[in-house]
Structures are given as structure tokens and as C-alpha cells.
Image (spheres, rainbow, N blue to C red):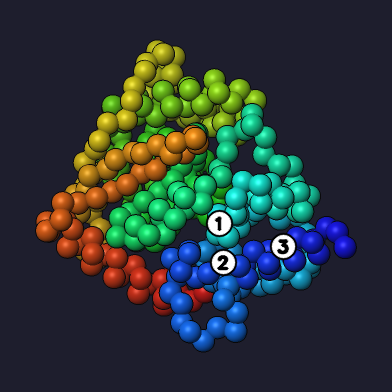
Amino acid sequence: MTGTTDLGRALHAWRDRTKPAEVGLPGDGHRRAPGLRREELALLAGLSVDYIVRLEQGRSTNPSPQVLSTLARALRLTTAEREHLFVLAGQTVPGPGQVSDHVPAGVQRLLDRLTSTPLSVYDAAWNLITWNPLWAALFGDPPTPHDFRRNAVWWSFVEPLVGYPQAVSRETGHRTAFVSDLRAASARYPKDAGLAALIHELRTRSGDFAALWDSGVVGVHEPLTKTVRHASVGEITLDCDILAALGTDLRIMAFTAPEGSETADRLRLLEVIGVQALTGAGTDT
């Protein structure tokens, strides 16, 4: 059998082989199979349980590249498995000339294990790819559509993410580094339509971005200190570091606080609040 039937079988097999502990979920000893439940995969992928069922049963066709990418991350697929997933779904496998949103398993495990550190991962164009629960507890869930509103450069120059520290996101040095990153990405991926559209819209919507772009300015990201005023735990001042994943164009943004500080205590409290909210939200997302 071909098409969505093969896709469904592959998804089911990958789900069965994925242990909850491998993706940061607790095991409960009452499982008929060692792998993920459909509800758990839905939670990890940000999809509804019904949609997972329809995919596995072959009743849903033509999942989008965005859906396939988030399923690949949730199931911790290798690069080869991810490409196979796209083929089974009838989608074009992203080529080397496109900005990749693939998160290697090692990077994903970093997010799974560093649960006490807000972490987010971005591609070469600074599109937000994935994040851990504490990042969401700190800043809120990003917009659902996969458009410019999920781009960190867009937040800095055009429309800040709700809950994100606006004063910091508009620092001159940080913005200069963003422009440099997009210029480098544009040279590396000249045929990526999404990247070209992002740069065009930024130039159109932001005079500051257009001026920096036309000036040819070059900048690098330096460690920052960001202050977030959170509704539940109050003001939190965090060190922000941007890390690179070798062999990829990914950027990992990490927020930390000195151990024993009041900020660290508030961050731990936020972690508890975030877990409670996640548990109370159910699994059908």
C-alpha cells in the first residue's frame, strides 16, 4: 500500500519506539506499549489528538511541511527519517538551498533535559522553530500561524511578541546583529522565497531595518541581560546567551540566572506554575 497508509504506519511505528523519558515526559508504569500515546504525541507536536488519529489511519491527506517538521521534531527523527516522512506525505523534501527548520536529536534532547532553563531554537532566518515549556511559561505561547509573527527579527523591528521584553528587543547592538544574520542567510540561501519575503517586508515595514540593511552594517550577538515583568511571579532579570549548534544554522537562545538569586527562585516558581498549567490544559491541543 502507498500514500497516506504508508505514512500512517510509519508514524505509528515511530511513535511506538519513542519512550516518554526520551522526550521529557514522565513514565507511569501502566502502559500497554512502551512508546508514546497519541495524546502525548499531539501534545509534543501542538496538534489535536483527532488529527494524529486521522493521519495514522490514512484519513487525512497532504499534511503541510510545517506539520511534518513538527512531527519530525516530536518523534526525534533523524535527517534521513525526516526526509522519508516528507516523501511518504507527498511533499517536496527541503533542499540544501532552503533555510532548514530541522532540529537534530541532540539539540532536541538539550531542550528536553534543561527543563529549568528557558530555551528557544531559531533557524538561520531567526524563525522560531521550537521551545521548551519554561520558555512558554515566561513569554507565552507564540502565534499559531507560521508567519512573520514567529520571527525574532520581526519582533525586534515591527511587532514585538506579546510578553517579550520590548525594551531589550529594541537594543541597537542586538538589532544590528539581527540584520547581519539575515544578510548572511540571504547570501547563503539566495533562492529561499520565505527568507526573501521576510527581508522585503522588514524593509517595507521598518525604516530602521531598511537603514541598517542599506548601510551594510556588520554586528555580532553579545551576551545580554533581559528584564521580564511577569504577571504571576513579578520582575525577572535574566542573562541571555545565544548559542550555535555546530553543523547547523540553528541559534539556541538560553535564559539563566545566578544560583541562589531571587531571580533564580522566581524562575523555579514559574517552572512549577508552568507545569501546573500544562497539566490542567489537557492533551487535546
Q: Nearer the viewer, residue 103 or 177?
A: 103
Judging by the rendered image, the residue that carries numbered circle 3 is 10
Is there CB contact under 8 Å for labels 2 and 1?
A: yes
Quarter in which the C terminus is drawn? bottom right
The percent position of residue 95, horizontal first and vertical second, equals 67, 35
The percent position of residue 92, horizontal first and vertical second, equals 74, 42
Q: Nearer the viewer, residue 62 or 230?
A: 62
Q: Name, please, the residue furthest toward the top.
A: 215
The percent position of residue 220, horizontal first and vertical second, equals 33, 25
For the residue labelled by badge 2, is the local secondary structure a helix, a strand or a loop?
Answer: loop
Distance, label 2 to label 3, CA atoms, is 12 Å
The percent position of residue 152, horizontal first and vertical second, equals 42, 39
Res 162 seen here: no
| Amino acid residing under circle 2 | Thr
Judging by the rendered image, the residue that carries numbered circle 1 is 76
For the residue labelled by badge 3, is the local secondary structure a helix, a strand or a loop?
Answer: helix
User: Going from the N terminus, do you reach mark 3 or mark 1 first?
Assistant: 3
Question: Which quadrant of the view contains residue 171?
Answer: top left
Q: Residue at x 43, y 39 (%)?
A: 245
Q: Name, please, the residue furthest toward the bottom.
A: 30
